[in-house]
Amino acid sequence: MFIDSHCHLDLLDLSPYQNDFAAFMAAEKQQKIDKMLCISLDLMTYPAMYELVKDYPDIYLSLGVHPNVKPKETLTEAQLLTFAEDEKVIAIGETGLDYFRSNGDLSWQQQQLKTHIRVAKHLKKPLIIHTREANHDALDILAQEGADEIGGVIHCFTEDWDFAQKAIALNFYISFSGIVTFKNALAIQEAAAKVPEDKFLIETDSPYLAPIPFRGKPNYPHHVCHVAEKLADLRGVALETIAKQSSANFKTLFNLI
């Protein structure tokens, strides 16, 4: 059984399942998907996402505002805490820094990340971190704000082994997505081969970033098995080993043991 540690279930194309979420969930179970962590992108769409998944005990939630989402007013800890104290919420994020899609003065993005870190520390819930073309600033803020106290995961890892080591030193796990299956993802593949066995997760980031052989098509949680297959090949272990270890790591990180 596999755990998809990062997906956006409210954004999936459910037309192959007759637009029936229950039918989709039944199909995922048949394809050996044990649990999923459904990730929020902003506070406006969170309530609808919550309603979609609230009755499924094997779907967990994160609460956060994506770094490319700039609220009309400065995000506050109180706004996050309104939703984040719910027991179904096991993580804070995704949050982080993205200097690729956003431009100009991005101090607001940095402040937003700091707000998430404070809430995570207050609730003792791990962070889901997104970083793109902002790796040094992201690591600096995590260190300065004491994020190592609660740790978390660098999701959809797109950096190199040097970055991975620094993140692990800050008490963060490294999560690999379908990108690790791409032929040109050599630095990511190197990191996937070297990350300690107790510090990696697997994810889809569905509906985005479908792995080979589905690249360019809609992504779904059950495609996480292809991520696991690539890691098994890179690490020279059995697929079952990756499934068991990534699931154990997920439960450890999110205090589900």
Image: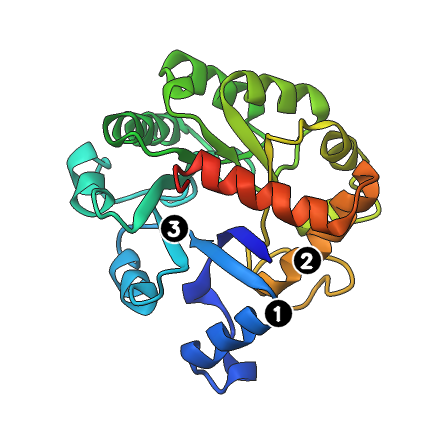
Q: Along the horizontal axis of the image, is 222 left or right of 141? A: right
The residue beneath circle 2 is 225
**Quadrant (top left, top right, bottom left, bottom right) of the C terminus:** top left
Amino acid found under the numbered disc labelled 3: Leu
Q: How many marks?
A: 3
Most extreme residue toward the top is 144
Is residue 176 in view?
no
Q: CA distance from mark 3 to mark 1?
A: 26 Å
**Quadrant (top left, top right, bottom left, bottom right) of the N terminus:** bottom right
Amino acid found under the numbered disc labelled 2: Cys
Q: CA distance from mark 2 to mark 1?
A: 9 Å
The residue beneath circle 1 is 31
* Depicted 52 relative to depicted 142: above or below: below
- The residue positioned 64% from the left and 19% from the top of the image is 165
- Percent x, y of residue 216: 70, 64
- Percent x, y of residue 184: 82, 43
